[in-house]
Image (cartoon, coloured by chain):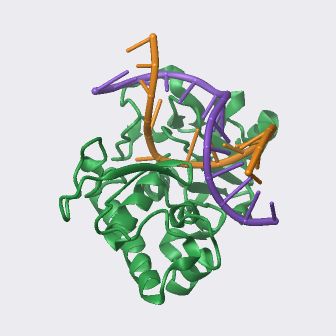
Chain colours: A green, B orange, C purple
Amino acid sequence: MPELPEVEFYRRLVESAGLGRRVAKVEALDPRYLRGGGDAAELSAALEGSTFARARRIGKLALLDTDRGHTLGLHFGMTGTLIIDEMSSVVSLMYSSPRLEPAWERFVLRFVDGGRLVMRDPRRFGRIELDPDEGRLGLDLLQLTPSALARVLAESAAPLKARLLDQARLAGAGNLIADEALWRAGLDPARPAGSLSPAELRRLHRHLLATTRDFLANGGSHTGLLLPHRRRGGRCPRDGAVLQQRTVGGRTTWSCPLHQR
DNA sequence: CCGGATGTTCACCT
DNA sequence: GAGGTGAACATCCG
């Protein structure tokens, strides 16, 4: 999906253009888009007549609090984007066509003022959920402290990268943030998570936050330094070594065999 | 035509 | 129980 930076852009979009507007109707709702096959009538009853009072985010989950005590959870999958009044945020998604296609509108809220909030998602991996269990997500990546990172990784034989992608332990990092931060930190994604020295832990913590903040500042998760070289024959922009492609933690992983140890 | 893509979940192994 | 793999989901792109 969009990773933390993209979802943060969506949160800000709601904050700047979606708060205080009364919901008239849940207008289009792909039934498969309700997480856990939830009840569409229940969703309409909870949202129609309400306004959004606050937009929060935990990891990759956007949370829209209504003025009546409900929360709408938005999860964007691989290709989900949020649109308000036909204006998208500045986000560009690598693997989602920018084309406008009404059939890709999986969830639409019509406001009383005539405007719309739309989730457009070609691949349909996104989900919405009323009053989601926020406890299923770990600490938000932007709130990560060195000691919290140590707890995320402690005593685990799982690959380092697999732990970083485990949303129940650390919420927000996706495949691109993980590869970029590990590359910057000079750490092998396949290292056992529990094997990092205190110095390596501090280094990884620093680069995880710096990478995420860079992506936020530069317009998204597709702005990494490693990204252009994630292709066959691509070379490490730091030392020129041919990059290695593997599957780690179930995801395609690119790393430098020379400086990531 | 085929394979793979910023993700999550589940079944099935070891 | 922990962790890995592969599939499924659905569509586009090279």
Q: Please name whichever residue, A153 or A6, is drawn nearer the observer in this view of the structure.
A: A153
Q: Which quadrant: the C terminus of chain A?
A: bottom left
Number of numbered discs on residues: 0
User: In the image, what residue occupies the spot 64% across and 41% down?
Assistant: A127
Q: Is residue A58 above or below residue A43?
A: below
Q: Is residue A27 above or below residue A23?
A: above
User: In the image, what residue occupies the spot 74% across and 38% down?
Assistant: A44
Q: Tell me if residue A49 can be seen.
A: no
Q: Is residue A42 above or below residue A168?
A: above
Q: Position of residue C8 (x, y in %)?
A: 67, 28
Q: Position of residue A233 (x, y in %)?
A: 24, 44
Q: Tell me if residue A202 can be seen.
A: yes
Q: Please name whichever residue, A201 or A33, is drawn nearer the observer in this view of the structure.
A: A201
From the viewer's perspective, tell me whether residue A97 is left or right of residue A32.
left
Q: Position of residue A120 (x, y in %)?
A: 50, 33
From the viewer's perspective, tell me whether residue A31 is left or right of residue A75.
right
The quadrant where residue A256 appears: bottom left
User: In the image, what residue occupies the spot 60% across and 75% down?
Assistant: A152
From the viewer's perspective, tell me whether residue A29 is left or right of residue A117.
right
The quadrant where residue A240 appears: bottom left
Q: Position of residue A180 (x, y in %)?
A: 36, 61
User: In the image, what residue occupies the spot 49% across and 63% down?
Assistant: A190
